[in-house]
Amino acid sequence: SQKIEQNSEALNIQEGKTATLTCNYTNYSPAYLQWYRQDPGRGPVFLLLIRENEKEKRKERLKVTFDTTLKQSLFHITASQPADSATYLCAPRGGYNKLIFGAGTRLAVHP
Amino acid sequence: DVKVTQSSRYLVKRTGEKVFLECVQDMDHENMFWYRQDPGLGLRLIYFSYDVKMKEKGDIPEGYSVSREKKERFSLILESASTNQTSMYLCASGSNRDRDSYEQYFGPGTRLTVT
């Protein structure tokens, strides 16, 4: 069955550093992959989409890569700020109109 | 701005009760989704709908049903609530017309406790 893996342990980094989060998927080949941000007690908010034919996508301080050979996406936040502290969810396309969400990685950026 | 609203933020129900969770979106989206979110398990798709009166089972439909009588409204029904249905329930909507992102817009969630 389709499986999404994200680091279950929280990632703690210092303000100003680059945060890198990993998403691995198995048993299928998604046409695209999305990343969402979720704050405590709130619904996820869309950040970026990257398609299978794109190696890299950038949006302001965010960068996403998509390696279809390794079946892996990396999500980077450069010059991180305490306001970036949240849980980040990886969501590859799981079929027509569907996403499959990972459990998320919690990021804590310390001043 | 897209807005997805859910009928309640917090709900406490007793075992065996019938529970209705309602979701309304204001962006004319054809697709609507119901997820539940539990610690360590991420968001799991219960049901989705791609048109009025259409519904498709997600990964965990057992114990749930849905209704979509109008395009903007998607209801999740727990026919007989059980304690293992205690969870955060999230509704989302999206459109296939949004080919740049296929973004799903989420509501604030309903934390349901079944006692």
Image (spheres, grey):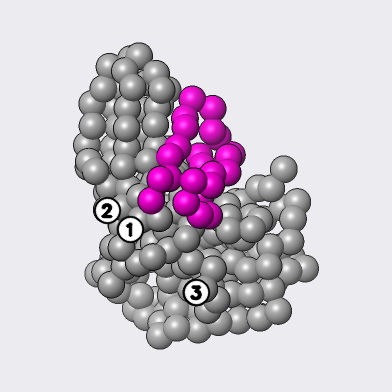
Residue A27 versus residue B33: which sits nearer the camera?
Answer: B33
**SS at mark 2?**
strand
Residue A9, can we see it? no
Q: Position of residue A58 (x, y in %)?
A: 50, 84
Mark 1 = which residue?
A: B25
Q: Do discs 2 and 1 belong to a common subunit?
A: yes
**Nearest the eye: A110 or A89:** A89
Answer yes or no: do the residues labelled 2 and 1 have beta carbons within 8 Å?
Answer: yes
The subunit letter for the residue under badge 1 reads B
Q: Which chain is disc 2 placed on?
A: B
Q: Residue at x 45, y 37 (%)?
A: B66
| Residue B75 pos. (x, y %) | 37, 41
Please tell me how crowded label 3 is: few (under 14), some (14-19), or many (20+) other residues with Cα within 10 Å.
few
> Crowding near pointer 2: few (<14 within 10 Å), some, many (20+)?
many
Could you tell me residue A52's position as x and y percent? 69, 73
Vertical comparison of B96 with A108: above or below? below
Cα distance between the residues tagged 2 and 3: 20 Å
Instruction: Say which label, 3 or 1, has the lower sequence index.
Output: 1
* Earlier residue among tags 2 and 3: 2
Q: Earlier in the sequence, mark 2 or mark 1?
A: 2
Q: Which residues are magenta?
A: B44-70
The answer to whether A2 appears left or right of B24 in the picture is right
User: Mark 2 = which residue?
Assistant: B5
- Amino acid bearing label 3: Asp
In the rendered image, the vertical position of residue B68 relative to residue A73, given as above or below: above
Which chain is indicated by disc 3? B
User: Which residue corresponds to the image point at 74% horizontal and 55% vertical from the top-left?
Assistant: A28
Q: Secondary structure at mark 3?
A: loop
The residue at 37%/21% (across/down) is B81
Q: Relative to residue B113, is residue A35 depicted above or below?
A: below
| Mark 3 lies on residue | B98
